[in-house]
Image: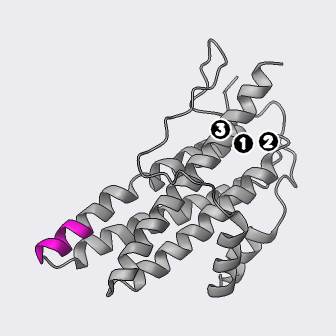
Amino acid sequence: MVFPCSCLDANTRECTPTPPTETMIEDSINHESIKMYVMSTHTFPEDVQELLDVPAGRRVPDPADDHVLTKYNQQIKLIKVAANVLPELWDKITVNRKAGIPITSAVMMFRLAMDTLSRHYLDFFRESSFKVDNRVQERKDTAKLGFFALRNLRNAVDQLNNVQSLVECEEQIKLVIRMADELHGQICETYEVTSKD
């Protein structure tokens, strides 16, 4: 049996979540405000909007096929890893800016990292069409908030010519990481609870 969470120990069947990153926001997140801000300021291509709108868990996977569950888990792991790359790349932008070095190359690398994270989210939404468990819609909703926060970050990066945008970028990076960690934590929590039954 392939366990759905990369932090689930095969011997103890206990979940050992990754400790929070230093860049996580300590206070609570107003999920509804993230959604409203993004939906009022961004439009998505039709195919992306369809992925966001369609309910999760519409398809029932073959119980004997662990491949669906493995791919689903892999996408969550890729989202977490890709989100946690952002602070290091952002530091290169801020260091170059303070040193008076052109930031074009560093910003391009940061944009590529955002594109990678965006692709992982879209792949996760596709994998969410399978009902891997009863919390698949809850995790998709969390992933949507992370995707929306990533769009807010992209918008802030587009406005890097002023100091307020720098502050906004830093706050959005924290939020993107927080939502990716929350998504990862939800899969760990689900299977930790299941393993105790």
Crowding at mark 3 (Cα within 10 Å: few <14, some 14-19, many 20+): some
Outermost residue, front side: 27
Residue range in magenta is: 93-100
Name the quadrant of the N terminus. top right
**Overall secondary structure of the magenta stretch?**
helix
Image location of residue 68, percent across then percent down:
72, 42
Crowding at mark 2 (Cα within 10 Å: few <14, some 14-19, many 20+): many
Kindly indicate the quadrant of the structure image that contains residue 73: top right
Q: Which residue is mark 3?
A: 70
Q: Which residue is mark 1?
A: 68
Residue visible at 39% across and 68% down? 112
Q: Are marks 3 and 1 in contact (CB under 8 Å)?
A: yes
* Figure label count: 3
Name the quadrant of the C terminus. top right
Q: In the image, which is nearer the foreground, mark 1 or mark 2? A: 2
Residue 113 showing in the rendered view: yes
User: Which residue type carries mark 2?
Assistant: Val
Toward the viewer: 63 or 148?
Answer: 148
Residue visible at 49% across and 41% down? 20
Mark 2 or mark 3: which comes first in sequence? 3
User: Which residue type carries mark 3?
Assistant: Thr
Residue visible at 62% across and 48% down? 182
User: Which residue type carries mark 1?
Assistant: Val
The colour scheme applied to this rendered structure is one colour
Residue visible at 39% across and 54% down? 85
Q: Are marks 1 and 2 in contact (CB under 8 Å)?
A: yes
> Is residue 54 part of the magenta span, yes or no?
no
Q: Which residue is mark 2?
A: 132
Q: Secondary structure at mark 1?
A: helix
Answer above or below: position of 8 versus 108. above
